[in-house]
Image (tube, grey):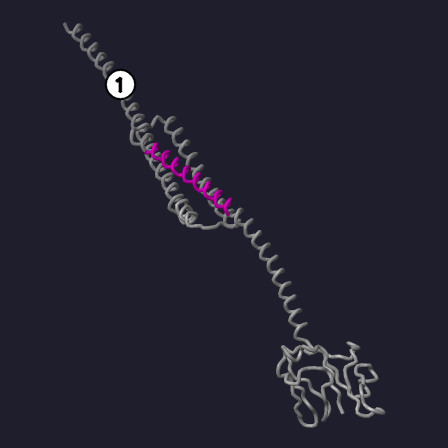
Amino acid sequence: MRKPLLIVLIAAIVLFIGSSLVLYQKLQQRTTEYTTLQADEQATRQRYNDAINEIAAIQDSLDAIVLGEDGARALATELGAEKSLSQDRGEEALARISMIKAGIERARDRIQALEAQLQESNVKTAGLEKMVHNLRKSVAEKEEIIVQLTQRVEELQTQVTGLTAEVQVGQQTIQLQAVTIQSQAMQIEDTRRALGTVYYTIGEKNELKDAGIIVGKGGILGLGKTWKPSGQIDETRFTPLDTDQERVIRIPAEEARIVSAQPLASYELQPVGDQLELRILDPQAFRTVKHVIIMTD
């Protein structure tokens, strides 16, 4: 009786040990699977957080493009207020647009890289997909702004080119008119000077006679002659006087008389110290005779 009971007991112990080993192995397997699952969940959560952070960074960069000091919105406002655009300002505007466009290109590349990472890591949620969709929509809107800004700059530059040509034509016209006006003014001045200028000479009787400027008429035996202009003019002996500017001829003598035929009422002789002054009272009448001959005694 004892021997069969011992055998049953031993078999039960062996069975228990075997069952325990199987259960232990299953427990180890479940523990390993749980640890792996936790690691995968943590990695997935980290990839999700990284995706959220990248989306936020991309959105910030896009907001900076529009809201920054050198952003598209400020540039659009500035260009909208421009009445004309110089070549330097046009190049500056295009350079700024290029910088904004480069920022948008970088944002698009980051979005594509983010989508590829999400696809590889199988992190797909409706929230993430909506965020990425909004990013793409924001990029598209800013690209449209860039297109409008570029067109605006090109239009303004075209206007400036036309205005520049008009200004050049206007400047040439003004220069021609200025030259014409200057020439006309010179002609008018020459005419005025010619009309207003008389030529005078001063000398004693014999000096003027020997020069052929005056001749004696009448008289008997050289006495009582009347001295008149000979009509022969030696311009080198006459001095010009612009009667519009100067109306006094100083005569270095105490006595003198006008031999030429100026109207008597158009002038007067006044003593000044030991000299005389011929004062022109009526320039227009005085210069009806262009050459003034003054004979001193």
Vertical placement of 236 versus 136: above or below?
below
Q: Nearer the viewer, residue 227 or 35?
A: 227
Vertical placement of 36 versus 236: above or below?
above
- Circle 1 sits in a helix, a strand or a loop, which is it? helix
**Percent coordinates x, y for residue 38 in the rendering:** 29, 28
User: Left or right: where does residue 241 sit relative to residue 36?
Assistant: right
**Percent coordinates x, y for residue 113 in the rendering:** 42, 32
**Percent coordinates x, y for residue 289 in the rendering:** 70, 78
User: Left or right: where does residue 172 sit relative to residue 75?
Assistant: right
Give the farthest residue toward the right: 221
* Magenta segment includes 102: no
Q: Find the magenta span and give its range.
A: 131-159
Image quadrant of residue 211? Answer: bottom right
The residue to which callout 1 is attached is: 26
Q: Nearer the viewer, residue 217 or 32?
A: 217
* Magenta segment includes 158: yes
Q: Quadrant of the N terminus?
A: top left
Vertical placement of 135 versus 119: above or below?
below
**Percent coordinates x, y for residue 24 in the rendering:** 26, 19
In the image, what residue type sits under mark 1? Answer: Lys
Count up the numbered dots.
1
Image quadrant of residue 27? Answer: top left
Q: Quadrant of the C terminus?
A: bottom right
| Chief SS of the magenta region | helix
Q: Which residue is depicted at the point 41% across and 37% down?
A: 144
Vertical placement of 208 versus 41: above or below?
below
